Image: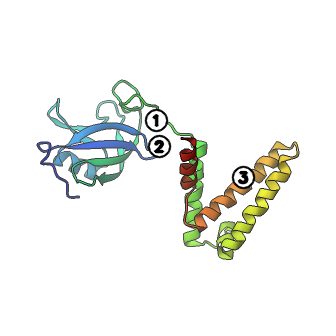
């Protein structure tokens, strides 16, 4: 990783983002030594301008930041560090240094995880998997299955059995994600369309 440390007298900004929630946790500065230690040890280490030394986040509190990925920006003078926090990040006890809650709706996030699994099935086509069978049948059959499930949702919506209605809705959502995957699209693409309409 070739970074430019010359613009800020040997330092570069390091933006730390939660790898799961994508929420920005904090911003610090690194010199070359701090970056090297971060890469070698897998824990985010900064150069503290107030202490004038290397400082590993959480060295006193135990709330370290475990590195997942380090990404340079387009000018190679800033890095984005995707990390997993082991506790509150801010010295005030807050989740982030920007006083934000570092939480996501796990139920909504599950849809992304589900599509990750479906995408993997599409790539590897493991034997015995229902999803593999769908991909092997091709887009016409997958689309037909989405239509069938949609009809079943409509039928169950007219009755008073919430359990059956929710099960049919889950089937529809699953098959819709399979169809998205077949078309090399993601559920996040649909979410972005909905967010655009909301604005």
Residue 133 seen by the camera: no
**In-image side of 101 versus 106 (left or right):** left
Image position, residue 26 (x, y; %)? 33, 36
Marks 3 and 1 in Cβ contact (< 8 Å):
no
Q: CA distance from mark 2 to mark 1?
A: 7 Å
Q: CA distance from mark 2 to mark 3?
A: 24 Å
Give the residue number, with chain letter if any, for mark 1.
102
Q: Quadrant of residue 135?
A: bottom right
Q: Residue at x 68, y 70 (%)?
A: 134
Residue 161 seen by the camera: yes
Which element carries disc 3, helix, strand or loop?
A: helix
Q: Is residue 41 above or below residue 141?
A: above
Q: CA distance from mark 3 to mark 1?
A: 28 Å
Q: Residue at x 27, y 55 (%)?
A: 74
Q: Is residue 185 above or below residue 98?
A: below
Viewer-side residue, 55 vs 49:
49
**In-image side of 99 versus 129 (left or right):** left
Numbered label attached to residue 21: 2
Give the residue number, with chain letter if any, for mark 3.
170
Image position, residue 50 (x, y; %)? 17, 29
């Amino acid at each position: 990783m070739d970074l430019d440390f010359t613009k800020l007298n040997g330092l570069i900004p390091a933006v730390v983002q939660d790898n799961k929630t994508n929420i920005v946790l904090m911003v610090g500065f690194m010199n070359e030594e701090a970056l090297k230690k971060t890469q070698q040890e897998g824990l985010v280490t900064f150069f503290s301008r107030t202490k004038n030394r290397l400082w590993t986040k959480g060295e006193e509190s135990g709330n370290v930041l475990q590195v997942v990925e380090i990404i340079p920006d387009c000018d190679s003078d800033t890095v984005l560090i995707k990390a997993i926090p082991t506790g509150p990040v801010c010295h005030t006890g807050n989740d982030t240094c920007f006083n934000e809650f570092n939480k996501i709706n796990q139920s909504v996030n599950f849809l992304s995880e589900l599509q990750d699994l479906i995408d993997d099935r599409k790539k590897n086509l493991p034997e015995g998997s229902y999803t593999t069978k769908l991909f092997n049948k091709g887009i016409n059959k997958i689309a037909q299955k989405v239509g069938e499930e949609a009809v079943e949702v409509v039928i169950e919506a007219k009755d008073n059995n919430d359990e059956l209605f929710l099960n049919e809705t889950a089937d529809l959502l699953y098959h819709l994600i399979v169809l998205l995957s077949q078309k090399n699209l993601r559920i996040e693409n649909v979410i972005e369309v909905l967010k655009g309409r909301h604005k």
